[in-house]
Image: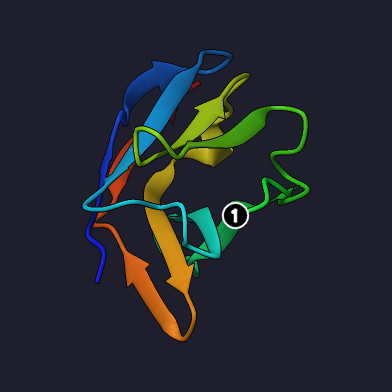
Amino acid sequence: QVQLVESGGGLVQAGGSLRLSCATSRSIFSINAMGWYRQAPGKQRELVAGITSGGNTGYADSVKGRFTISRNNAKNTLYLQMNSLKSEDTAVYYCNARELSDEYWGQGTQVTVSS
């Protein structure tokens, strides 16, 4: 079991930046993959960015070049640096972790980008 707690969301103007954090309840060293998802009102949840235990990363086309995912195994924390934010980035952002056949989700943090 692992518990995930997101923080760092808020209201920001278009063009601004935010850094989301996902604190975990135990070591993430053995977690195969972690990622950030988002869900806007009336839309399905979508993968924003992912990172493997080996440090390989992947991004949705809509955020490439603007968002950066990283993990600090020593601090048991996952991050999402979001730059050049756009109004279409407004959503609830969720942290996700996958370990073998188990999957865990955080409670989400709201990001609102005003134009």
* Residue nearest the observer in this picture, 100 or 97: 100
* Residue nearest the observer in this picture, 84 or 34: 34
In the shown orientation, is residue 69 left or right of residue 26?
A: right
Q: Residue at x 73, y 49 (%)?
A: 56
Mark 1 surroundings within 10 Å by alpha-carbon count, few (fewer than 14), some (14 through 19), many (20 or more): some
Q: Number of marks in the image?
A: 1
Q: Residue at x 50, y 34 (%)?
A: 80
Q: Quadrant where the N terminus lies? A: bottom left
Q: Residue at x 69, y 27 (%)?
A: 66
Kind of element beneath mark 1: loop
Q: Residue at x 40, y 76 (%)?
A: 103
Measuring from the top left, give residue 24's x and y in whole percent. 28, 49
Kind of residue at disc 1: Ser
Measuring from the top left, give residue 76's x and y in whole percent. 35, 41
Measuring from the top left, give residue 58's x and y in whole percent. 73, 51
* 49 vs 89: above or below: below
Name the residue that disc number 1 marks.
Answer: 53
